[in-house]
Structures are given as C-alpha cells and as structure tokens.
Image (cartoon, rainbow, N blue to C red):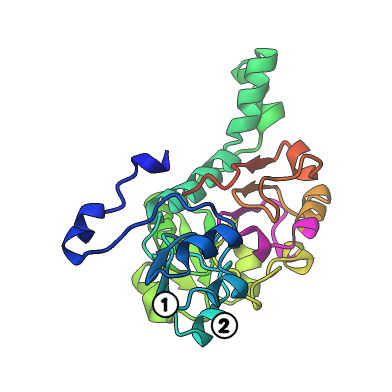
Amino acid sequence: GMDRIDFGEKLLEPFDVTLVKNIEQTEDSVIANCKDADAVIGSISHANVFTRKVIEQMSKCRLIAGPSIAFETIDLGAANECGIAVANNPDYCLDEVSGRVIGLMLALSYKFFQIDKVVKEEGIGRGQLRQVAGPIARTQGQTLGLVGLGKIATIAALKARGLGMRVISYDPYVLDGYMRALNVEPVDMDTLLKESDFISVHVPVTPATRNFIGYEQFKKMKPTCYFINASRGAVVDEPTMIRALDEKLIAGAGIDVTVKEPIERDNPLLKMSNVILTAHSGW
C-alpha cells in the first residue's frame, strides 16, 4: 500500500533531490539506505529504529522528521549530540483520536457492546435489558476529566462540552486562563480523580509519566467512573488497572493502547465484558 501514497515527489523535482521510499524498519536497513541521507522521514513513535547505533551512522543527516505527534522511540540524546534536528507533527490525527475518546466514552456509558452481545446471542428485548445494561446515566451534566490538555485533549474537551458535559483537567504545563477560555475547569490531580465520571489520559511517554496512573490513582476514582486511554499504554500501570477492574474500583475501561502491541492473548483485559479494546486504531 505504501507505493500508492503520494510523498510529494513533484515538490522535490526543482531541487535535484533523490527520494528513497519503502525502507524496511530495521536498524540495518535504515543504516544501509540512510547513511548518506541529508534528511530522513520515518516513524519516531513506534518502530524502534532510530537508535544511537543508527543515528551515529547517519553522518550527513541534519533532520529526522516523524509524521506523528509522539516521538518516544527516537534517541533524542544521540540526535542532539550528532547535530540532527528532530521534528514531529503536532497536528496529526487530532479529530481521529479525540473522536475515539468520545466514542469510547459513549459506548461505555450506554453499554453498547454488552447490549449488542445479548441481543444477538439471546434475542432479548427492551424489557429485559435493564438486568444487562442498567443503570445508564445521561451524558449531559456528567464530568469528563482530562489528564493533560494538549491538542487532542483540547478537541475532546470541545466535543464533550457540545454534549453538555462538565470538563475538568489537570495539566501543570497549561495556563489556567487557557483552560477557562475553553470552558474547562483547571483542577489538581486528586480533584480530577475524585470528581470525574470519565477519565481520559492525554500525556506523552516520558520518565515522569511512565506508569503515571497506578493503583493509588484508581483507588481515588469513583466506582462508577470509566477510564479511557488513547495516548500510550506505558503511561498506565497495566497490572494495577487490571486489578482495579477486578476489584470493581472503576466501572470499566476503553483502551486503545496497551503496553504490548498487539495485546498478548493471555491478557486478562480480553475477557472483561466492561472493557473495550480497539488495538491502537485511533489514528
């Protein structure tokens, strides 16, 4: 499929530039094809190929650009030492991922998947659904808590406000005035955990955010709260999330990203009816 993508070759024609495409995402292949490149475009968020070993071989390179927002798999220290600039795309998939968050929130709240399953398997009708799906609360007036308020979370906040929801956020790097301009209430982390009916995580993977949401955080959430993660699996301590679900500390979860992708077949999340898994398809 990559051979059908327009990489903008025509834009390069006046500049006597050679474009090499479809490079295999392995260290050896990148070194062989990019060691003399002036610039490289490739995955800096998933494929772990821009390692120190690779970067140090790219002696002529002055730019590594990735098409996505995230950039956790590139060795930034090595790039800096070699004088190579690293660029991401901060506007990538803002509508797609924010829409995924709202979709997961609604599907969890209205128990769409549980209802769909019993209707198809048992043929039950409206009068019997209360035992399967109740209680279901209306969306209007419920509280969405956003951990991090970057571009994707900002779009999610606007969509949630359109549904009549109260939106709160914890982000120490965003000014309170910016949040209030979006009709988002700035709160501390404890308040967000205790007051939210839905919690959605929107932080990058850094040493400070790895396993940022763990058992202590889940214990502070409402037992009726739904947890959503469409950022990165590593920002959540997955075993403690599974424990929180087992202990009914939260009502359910919408998980687009997991620590290991694809998810391992023995992962307990696969057997939980109150968990929706979407295999990192929010892009």
Secondary element type, mark 2: helix
- The image position of residue 177, as x and y in percent, is 38, 80
Residue found at the far left of this picture: 14
Magenta-drawn segment:
220-240
Q: Quadrant of residue 136?
A: top right
The residue nearer to you, when weighing 106 against 97, is 97
* Upstream in sequence: badge 2 or badge 1: 1
**Which amino acid type corresponds to the residue marked 1 in the rendered image?**
Lys
Q: Residues within 10 Å of mark 2 (few under 14, many from 20)?
A: few
Instruction: Give the alpha-carbon distance from disc 2 to disc 1, as whole Å.
Output: 17 Å
**Which amino acid type corresponds to the residue marked 2 in the rendered image?**
Gly
Let me know if residue 237 is in the magenta part.
Answer: yes
Q: Is residue 177 visible?
A: yes
Q: Which label belongs to residue 141?
A: none
Count of numbered tags? 2
The residue nearer to you, when weighing 279 against 56, is 56
Let me know if residue 84 is in the magenta part.
Answer: no
Identity of the residue drawn at 58% across and 66% down: 73
The answer to whether mark 2 and mark 1 are in CB contact below 8 A is: no
Q: Which residue is mark 1?
A: 60
Q: Residues within 10 Å of mark 1 (few under 14, many from 20)?
A: some
Secondary element type, mark 1: loop
Circle nearer the viewer, 2 or 1 = 1
Q: Quadrant of residue 127?
A: top right
Identity of the residue drawn at 72% across and 52% down: 250
In the shown orientation, is residue 18 left or right of residue 14?
A: right
Q: Which residue is mark 2?
A: 77
Q: Quadrant of the N terminus?
A: top left
